[in-house]
Amino acid sequence: MAQYEALLRPFRLKGLTIRNRIMSTAHAPRFTEHDMPGERYQLYHEEKAKGGIGLTCFGGSSSVAVDSPLPFGQIDASDDRIIPYFVGFAERIHRHGAKLICQITHIGRRANTDQHHWLPLISPSSVRETLHRGFPKEAEDWDIRRTIRRYAQAAGRCKAGGLDGVEVIAAAQHLIDSFWSPMVNKRTDGYGGSLENRMRFGLEVFEAIRKEVGEGYVVGLRMSGDELVDGGLGAEDCVVIAETYARSGLIDYLNVYQGQASNFAGLAVILPNMSFPPAPFLYLASAIKARVAIPVFHASAIRDLATAARAIEGGHVDLVAMTRGHIADPHIARKLMEGRPEDIRQCVGAGYCVDGLLEAGTACIQNAATGREKTMPHVIPLATARRKVVVAGGGPGGLEAARVAAARGHRVVLYETAERVGGQINLAAKASWRENLTGIVRWLESQVRKQGVDLRLETSATPEAIEAEGPNVVIVATGGRPWRGLAEGSDLLTTTWDILAGRVAPAGNVLLYDEHGGHQAPSTAEFMAERGASVELATPDRAPAMEMGGSNFPIHFRELAKRGVVFTPDVRLMAVRRDHARLVASLVNEYTRESEERLIDQVVVEYGTLPEDALYVALKERSSNRGEVDITALIAGRPQHLKRNPEGRFQLFRVGDAVAGRNIHAALYDSLRLCKDL
Amino acid sequence: MPGYEALLRPFTLKGLVIRNRIMSTAHAPGYAEAGVPGERYQLYHEEKAKGGIGLTMFGGSSSVSPDSPATAFGQVAVTNDAVIPVLEQFAARVHRHGAAIMCQISHMGRRNRWDAADWLPLVAPSVTREPQHRALPKEIEDFDITRIIGDYARAARRCRDGGLDGVEVMLAGAHLINQFLSPKWNARTDEYGGGLDNRMRFGMAVLGAIRKEVGEDYIVGARLSGDELIEGGLGQDDMLEVARRIAGSGLVDFMNVMHAQPADHIGLALNIPNMAFPPAPFLYLASAIKAAVDLPVFHAGKIADLATAARAIEEGHVDLVAMTRAHIADPHIARKLMEGRPEQIRQCVGANFCIDRLYTGGGALCIQNVATGRERTIPHELPRSSGPRKTVVVAGAGPGGLEAARVAALRGHRVILFEREARAGGQINLAAKAPWRDSLTGIARWLDAEVRRLGVDVRLGTAATVETIEAENPDAVLVATGGRPNKGAFKGDGNAVSTWDILSGATQPGENVLVFDDNGQHQGAGVAEHLANRGSLVELATPDRMVAEALGATNFAIHLRELHKLKVVMSPNLRLVEVGREGNQLVAVLRHEYSGHEEERLVDQVVAEHGTLPVDELYFALRPRSSNLGEVDYEALVEGREQAVVNNAGGKFKLWRVGDAIASRNIHAAIYDSMRLCLPL
C-alpha cells in the first residue's frame, strides 16, 4: 500500500528495533486481577502483537508506591510481586515480534484517599484535583525522597521483568507534572517557584531511574504539549520542559499528550471523542519534535491510516499511536501489510472504551472480541458444516450476526425493512456531533457484502418468507421502537425519534424528558436548540447524561450550556394534557413528591426502546428451541443445543434491542456469542 | 443486665436453637471476590459470632442465576456447586463460636445492570426501568420463569449442602419476586399478572420448588416488606394479606419483615434509614405481621440501642431483633451485654458510611470502627503490648486524637491527651449542628468515654505546645490537630465566609445566600439546609454535576428531599471565581465548568466550602526534635509492623500526624490513621 508505506518502516529506538511505526500508548483497561496483569490483560495486548503492531505500551498509570492508589484499576508495580507477570507478558508479546513498554507513575493527587491503602495523597501543594476529589497533603521532604526511590525501584522491576523499556507519565495531573504546573505547585522551597525548581523533582526521578536501570535501557517520558487551561502550562512552557528533559540525556523518547484533565471538561480534551476532528493535537507533538533531538510519539484521535501516515511522512512524530484504533481493531498493521486496509475496523471515537463506566473492564462499542480474547475470536474460524442462516434486521446486531455467520462459511440471508442498513445508528448519527457513528455500520455492511451475504433491503422478513428459505438458524434482530413511558396522556408526546428523523419539527418551548440517561436526550436537546427551540431537559436522575462517562458528557454539557438548555434533575413526568393550543406537563419531585407544572408547546420524551418482537413471537413455536438460549453454554462459549420442540426445524435467537433496549455493544456481543459457534 | 434479659433468651426455630434474640440480617458488604465469600467476608461474620450474636445472615442478594449478576453490590453467587465447600468453611467458622448462620438468595430481575459480568439481558415481569440502576429489562419469557425457579431451588440446596442453618428468600427489595408481586411494576395480562393470586404465583412457585428440593426439615424463610410506602405499590393491608397467604402455604419457617421498596434513591433511603430517622421507625410493620401470622418474625431497621431492641422482644413485636448496622459498628454487642458492660458497646450512629460506600465504589467500612471488614489485620479486641510501657502524647481530641489515645491506652501505655477546646470531638461537634446530623456526636461520646475509662490523662482547654509535650518525656507524639476551614481559591475570598462560620454561629445567616460547595459531601448541603431553616433564601452552587456528588444514596436522598422542601435552588456545573463588594451586597461570579460562560449573583452572603487545610504548625515545630523527622514507613504501616524510621539520632520521640492535620479527609480516615500507627506501639 504505497500511500501508507511510511507506517511500515522499522524504527530504531536506542538498541531496540521496532518493526514499524505503529504503536499503542499505555492505558488502563481495568483488566487487572488483584492489581496484576493476568491472562485477560496479556491476551488483550497479545492480540495487537499478533496483529502486527510495532510497540505496545501497557500499564497506564502503573503504581510505583503504596500511596499511589489505583482508581482506574491499574497495575500495582510497587513491589516485586509484579516481576513474574512482566516476564510472562514480555514472552507473550515478543513471540509475535512486537515490543512492549510499561508506564509507571506516582499518581499524586489524582485519586481519592478512601480506597486502596487509605494513605494520604501527596502533591506539591494542598491543591485538590476536581476530578478525583481527594484533598492531598503537601509532600514533605521524606515523601520526595521516598517517592523518587519508588520510581527507580519500579523501573528496575520493568527491566528485571524483561520489558523493552519503561515510560514515566508526567501528564494528566500525576505527581511529576503537578510539580511542573504553577496551578498546583505553590511551594517556596527548592521544588517550587521558578520553572527550574518546578522541574527539579522530575529530573531527580529520572536520575534515580537511570541509575537503577543503566545506560542501555529505554526510558521514556509522557508529557503534555499544552495543558490548555487558564493558569496551567502553555505550549511554550511545555516545549521548554521537553527540551530540558531531552537535553538531560536521561530519557530516550518523549510521548506527547495534551490537556491537563484535572476536571471532566479537561478529561474530554485528553480523550477526544468523535466531536473532535482527526489528530486534533498532532501540532503539539510536532512542535516538540522540532525542538528536541530524541524520538517523539503521539496519540490522540488518529483513527485512520491516511492521518497516521501523514504524521510520520510529514515528520511530525517518529511513532504514531493508534490506541483506541487498536481497541477497535488490533490487526491494523497486519491488514495493511496484507494489502487489505479496507478490512480495518476503524475507531469511530465513540469513547465507549474510555468512559470508565464498565466495572468489568473496558469494551469496544463495535468490536465485542476486544478484552474477551480468551472466549471471543478476532478472526472467525470456518465451521465444519455449512448451514443456512437467516437474519431479520440490518441494524448493528443483525449485521454482526450476518458477518460472523458468513465468516463461519454459512449461507446467510439478511432482511432489512428500510432502504439501507444501520438501524438506530442512522438516527443517532443525525444529532449534532454524532455523525461518525455511521462508521460502525459502514464497516459491517462492507464486510457483509464482501462475504457474499444475500442482503435484501426494503424487504420485511415474514415467518413465511423465512421458512421458505429453509433455514437452520434464524436470528431476529428487529431492534426496538421508542417507548412512550407510563405517564398519562402519552398520545400527546413526541419521541426523540420523531425529532431526529425529522418527522416532527421542534416547536417553541419544549420540555424534553429523559428517563434513559444515554446520548439520545442530550443529542435531541442540542438538535432542537440549534433549530431555535427553548429547551428544558428534565430527568428523574440526579443529572442529565448519567449513563455517560467523561469523554462524552462534558461535550454534551458544553453544547447544552452554550445553547441555553435548562437542566431540571430530580423530577418525574406524570401526566401531559392539552390546554388550548399548548400542553401542560405535570412533574413530580422524586424526593418530596411535590408536583409542579409546565405550560409548553411540545413534550419530547426518551425512555429507551421497547422490543420489536412480533416476528420473534410468531416464530417461537415453529422453532426447535422455542427461542430459548442455554445461558450456561453461551457464557462458556459452547454451541447452543436446546431442544424444546421436536417439530421445530430451525433454531431461533433474538439479539440486541429486539430482546431489551440496550446499546450497540450489547447487540454486537449477542450476535458474536451466538454466531461464532454456529 | 436487668432491662435487657429478653434479648438473651434462647429461641428455637424449627429445631434450631438460637442462643439469643440478637441477629444480623443479610446484606452485601462488597467483600465477595468474583462472587465467592472468601476469607475477608467470613472473618467479618466470624467476628459477630465471637461477639455472641445468635444468628448471622450473610449473602444479601446472593445471586441464583447468571442473569442476576452478583456485581451490583459485590454479592455472593450461589449459581453453581463450586460454592458448596466455601459455604462449608463459612458455616464451620461461625458454628465454632456457637452462632447460627444462614444465607439470603435472590434473583434481582431488573434491579441490576446488563453491562456487567456476562452481559445477559435482565428479566422482569414487564418492561419498566428501575430508577436506581437505570436498565431496561426484557419481559420475562416462559422458559426464563421455569429456569429461574429451578435456579432458586438449586441455590437453596447448595445452602443446605454447605451446612448453613437455613436459607432466606428475598421477596422484597425491589428484586424479581417483588417485581412480580407489586402492581406498580407488573403489567402482565397472563397468569402471572393482574390479581394478587397471579402476582404471587411466581414467588409461591419459587418457595414451592425450594421446599421440594431441600425437604421439610430445612429452614426456609421469606424476607418481605411490611409496606412498600410508595404510591401504586403494595400498602400495609396488601402486605398483611401476602404474609397471611405465604404463612398459610406452610412453605416457610420465618418471616423477616422490612419496609419500603428501594427502586429509587429515596426508596433506598427509607429502606436503610440513616440518622435522620428516629429509632426503630418501621417496627410497627413487623409487629403487625407478627400479629397476623403464626410464624416467627424478625425485623431490622435502625434498631441501634439495647433499650429499643429489648422492647421489640419484650413487647412481642418480633421474635428476633436484627441489629445489622449496629454489628458493623460493634460486632461484640451480645458478649458485652452478657458480660455486664453494655456501656462499652460502640453504638451505630446511623451515618450510613458503610452502606453508602457500596454506591460510591468500595467495600463496606464503618465510619467509627476501622477494624470492621479488616479483621485479618486489625483485631476488634486489642491486645496489651508485651513491650515496655511507653508515654504517648496526643495533641488534639477530635476523632483521630481520641482513637490514638484509646488504642495507645489499650496497649497499656501512659497517655496524655491535650485538647484546646472545652470538650473533645473536634469537627464532629460542628458537623452535628447541621440539621438531622446530631447523632454524629455518638462517635465522640463513645471514644471520650472509653478514653476516660482507660485512664487517659485528658487535658481539656489546654493547647499542646512543644514545651508541654516535651515536659512529658514522650516516646511517641501524635499530632491530631485537625484542620481549619478552606474556602478554596477564588478572587475576593475574604468576602466569603466558611461553612464553619455558619454552623458555629460565629456568623449570622444572610437573607440572600449563595452557598458554593466545592467538596460534595455533607458540609455544603447541610449548611444550605441550616440556612434555609433559618429563613435565608439559598442557592447551592457546585462545580460538580450534582449536589452532594460524593455521598451515597441513603444520605444524598435525604439532603435532596430537605433541599427541595426548603426551596433551595441547586445550581450544578458552576465554579465560583470571584466575590466582590457592591454597596452592602456581594457580587459572586460563577463560571460554567463546560462552556466557560460567566454569570453573576447579587447576594448578601457567600458561604464557601472546600474541605479543610491542615493545622500543622505544631507538627512542623516538633519535627526537627523527633527521631523520625515525622516520616512514616508506609510499607510497615500497611503491613501492620511497628514504625522504625530513624532520621535524627538526637531526636527523643517518634512523631506522627493523623487525620485532617495531614490532609482534609473524613472521620474514618482519621481513626484508621491512628489505629494503624498505635496498634503496633
Image (spheres, coloured by chain):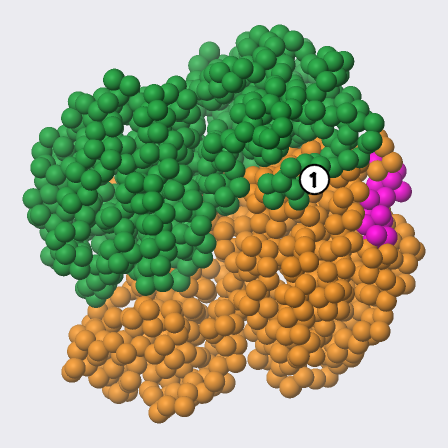
Measured from the top left, where is residue B139 in percent x and y?
A: 73, 33
Q: Residue at x 54, y 29 (%)?
A: A382
Looking at this view, is B168 or A602 the one in front?
Answer: B168
Picture quadrant of residue A515:
top right
Which residue is drawn at the image coordinates 46% and 37% (left, top)? A370
Measuring from the top left, give residue B289's x and y in whole percent: 84, 58
| Residue B199 lies within the magenta run | yes
Figure colour of chain B: orange
Please report the residue visible at 74 percent of the width from the left and 65 percent of the height from the top: B161
Which amino acid type corresponds to the residue marked 1 in the rendered image? Answer: Asp
Residue A102 in sight in this render: yes
Answer whether residue A107 is magenta in the image.
no
Q: Which contiguous range is marked in magenta?
A: B193-209
Q: Chain of mark 1?
A: A
Which chain's colour is green?
Answer: A
Q: Quadrant of residue A509?
A: top right
x and y, in percent, of residue A545 in the image: 50, 32
Q: Is residue B460 left or right of residue A650?
A: left
Q: Residue at x 74, y 13 (%)?
A: A468
Residue B1 position (above or below residue A512): below
| Majority SS type along the magenta span | helix
Q: Quadrant of the N terminus of chain A?
A: top left
Element type where label 1 sits in the image: loop
